[in-house]
Image (spheres, rainbow, N blue to C red):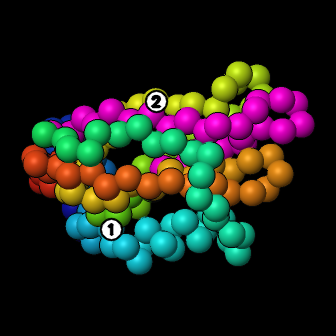
Amino acid sequence: MANMSDISRRHVLQLAGSAALCGGLPIVTVRPAQATPAMLSSAIRNLVGEATVQQGKVKLDIPPLVENGNTVPMTVSVDHPMTETDYVKSIHVFNEKNPQPNIGNFYLTPRAGRAQVATRIRLADSQKVVAIAKLSDGSFWQTSADVIVTLAACTEEVP
């Protein structure tokens, strides 16, 4: 063991710098490169539980053919009134092949005025996109769209 008087200021600064550098390294987690249809089904089941998901009321406006998967415009609207007692509580968007099956969750109140959200998403490959709306009465409604992507996103290695 070195004597405390033998440790120089420079040595202490080097140790502190090394510790800070090690603390700044990212933690690498291993996950599948793509979601699967089974992961999509599981994510939807986590949302709806045992409830039946009905077709209709939800409109998913997304281009059927996308040149670049890095920025895909998407609008989800629900044909439902937005009154104090009867409204759309949330809109959830899922995908089939991105690294994570859940694209986004949007929570609404009657003060939103209308049940519509618009955003841009990334798509890793040609796949199915599913939009589900939860109404204030506890019912779930859905629609889906198939999107063909010519230049995939979400596949680049991050340094």
> Does residue 75 show up magenta in the picture?
yes
Q: Tag 2: residue type?
A: Ala
> Does residue 73 show up magenta in the picture?
yes
Q: From the image, tell me which residue sits under label 1.
A: 35
- In this view, the residue in front, 137 or 69, is 137
Q: Which quadrant holds residue 81? A: top right
Q: From the image, tell me which residue sits under label 2.
A: 118
**What residue sits 89% from the left and 37% below the top?**
85
Residue 77 lies, in percent from the top left, at 55, 35
Residue 139 - label: none
Q: Is residue 133 left or right of 61 when viewed as pictured?
A: right
**What residue sits 37% from the left and 73% below the top?**
37
Marks 1/2: CA distance? 23 Å
- Per the image, label 1 sits on a secondary structure element best described as loop
Crowding around mark 1 (Cα neighbors within 10 Å: few <14, some 14 to 19, many 20+) is: some
Does residue 25 show up?
no
- In this view, the residue in front, 137 or 156, is 137
